């Protein structure tokens, strides 16, 4: 079993062309406007859910179409049905439940960007930004034929998008449920369900994978924002909110105090002197206004 696990976790190296095409697909489809970032994370077969994109040892990149208990072996196992991203090719197999396979997950920086948009939208009592909605759709879509994929590329909101979001909302992952709710609320709040002009224009420029493959090269993702930096950015956001509304907000004041205290814990991105100066300046600017 140990040997099988080790082999399964190294399978990404055996499919470089497929992974390059797969990870760069939305960048090609949107002429570089949309570039979701991913990481490969080992997960046990027993934890896989429908829609997960997995590096299967024999098939390469494939999506989980269905998962159910298998009774072909004495040990706990799962029967997995696979499909490709076009939804056409299918395969099935039984796997031990504790076998670890590499799965594609959103990179930390994308998770942070989406969460910040959700938090700010909740604070301002509005919907998430269009860019955040697009990034959520890029990570939640389950193939090129899905309504979520079409929204990520052109901004078109088809009726089927709500059925797909209802499915993703049932995910065991808390962040997937939160993203599904945020994107559902965004779509419901739109007056125009048609394509967004800037997105659709970029989509019209897309090239065929074989024409663009050589230009899509793995590039290091930007470093995730340090927690202290995020706290300072959040503090600046709440400051702007208080100044814009022109009246004190006890909840914002309490939240700012907590953010400033947490930000003092340290940062890998600021020297101690820079962090101390930033916190002092921010606190001095905030105090007379809130």
Image: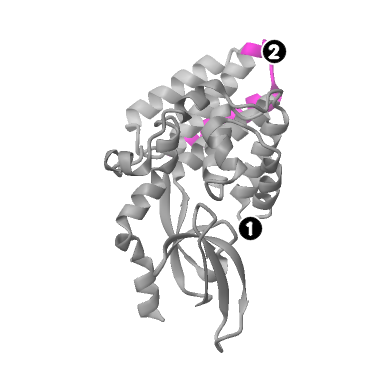
Q: Which residue is mark 2?
A: 247
Q: Determine whether 203 is above or below 87 in the image.
A: above
Identify the image quadrant of residue 228: top left
Is residue 248 magenta-colored?
yes
Give the left or right position of residue 85, taking residue 146 as reference: left
Q: Nearer the viewer, mark 1 or mark 2?
A: 1
**Are there few (<14), some (14-19), or many (20+) residues within 10 Å of tag 2?**
few
Q: Quadrant of the N terminus?
A: bottom left
Q: CA distance from mark 1 to mark 2?
A: 41 Å
Q: Residue furthest bottom?
A: 74
Tell me residue 230's x, y (percent).
Answer: 48, 33
Q: Residue furthest top?
A: 246
Q: Quadrant of the C terminus?
A: top right
Task: Looking at the picture, tell me which residue is in the foreground, 282 or 65.
Answer: 65
Q: How many marks do you count on the picture?
A: 2
Q: Residue at x 41, y 23 (%)?
A: 278
Circle nearer the N terminus (1, 2): 1
Give the left or right position of residue 261, taking residue 147 as reference: left
Q: Residue furthest left?
A: 214
Tell me residue 226's x, y (percent).
Answer: 42, 38
Q: Residue at x 49, y 57 (%)?
A: 84
Mark seen at residue 172: 1
Is residue 7 magenta-colored?
no
Tell me residue 25's x, y (percent).
Answer: 42, 43
Residue bounds of the magenta highlight: 244-265
Identify the image quadrant of residue 3: bottom left
Task: Looking at the picture, tell me which residue is in the foreground, 243 or 56.
Answer: 56
Task: Report the predominant secondary structure element of the magenta stretch.
Answer: helix
Q: Determine whether 70 is above or below 263 in the image.
A: below
Q: Is residue 103 visible?
A: yes
Q: Residue at x 52, y 46 (%)?
A: 144
Task: Looking at the picture, tell me which residue is in the foreground, 244 or 151.
Answer: 151
């Amino acid at each position: 079993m140990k040997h099988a696990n080790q082999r399964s976790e190294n399978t990404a190296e055996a499919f470089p062309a497929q992974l390059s095409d797969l990870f760069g697909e939305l960048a090609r489809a949107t002429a570089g406007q949309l570039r979701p970032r991913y990481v490969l994370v080992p997960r046990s077969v027993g934890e896989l859910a429908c829609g997960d994109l997995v590096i299967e040892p024999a098939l390469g990149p494939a999506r989980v179409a269905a998962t159910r208990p298998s009774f072909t072996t004495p040990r706990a196992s799962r029967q997995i049905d696979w499909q490709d991203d076009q939804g056409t090719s299918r395969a099935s197999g039984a796997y031990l439940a504790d076998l670890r396979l590499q799965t594609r997950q959103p990179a930390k920086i994308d998770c942070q960007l989406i969460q910040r948009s959700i938090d700010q939208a909740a604070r301002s009592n509005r919907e998430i930004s269009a860019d955040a909605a697009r990034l959520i759709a890029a990570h939640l879509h389950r193939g090129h034929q899905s309504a979520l994929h079409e929204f990520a590329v052109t901004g078109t909101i088809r009726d089927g998008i709500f059925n797909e979001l209802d499915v993703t909302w049932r995910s065991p992952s808390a962040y997937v449920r939160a993203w599904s709710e945020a994107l559902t609320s965004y779509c419901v709040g739109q007056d125009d369900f048609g394509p967004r002009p800037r997105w659709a224009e970029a989509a019209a420029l897309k090239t065929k994978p074989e024409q663009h493959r050589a230009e899509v090269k793995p590039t290091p993702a930007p470093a995730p924002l340090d927690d202290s930096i995020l706290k300072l950015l959040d503090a600046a956001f709440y400051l702007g909110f208080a100044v814009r509304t022109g009246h004190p907000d006890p909840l914002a004041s309490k939240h700012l105090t907590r953010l400033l205290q947490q930000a003092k814990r340290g940062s890998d991105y600021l020297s101690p002197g820079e962090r101390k100066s930033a916190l002092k300046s921010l606190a001095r600017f905030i105090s007379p206004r809130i």
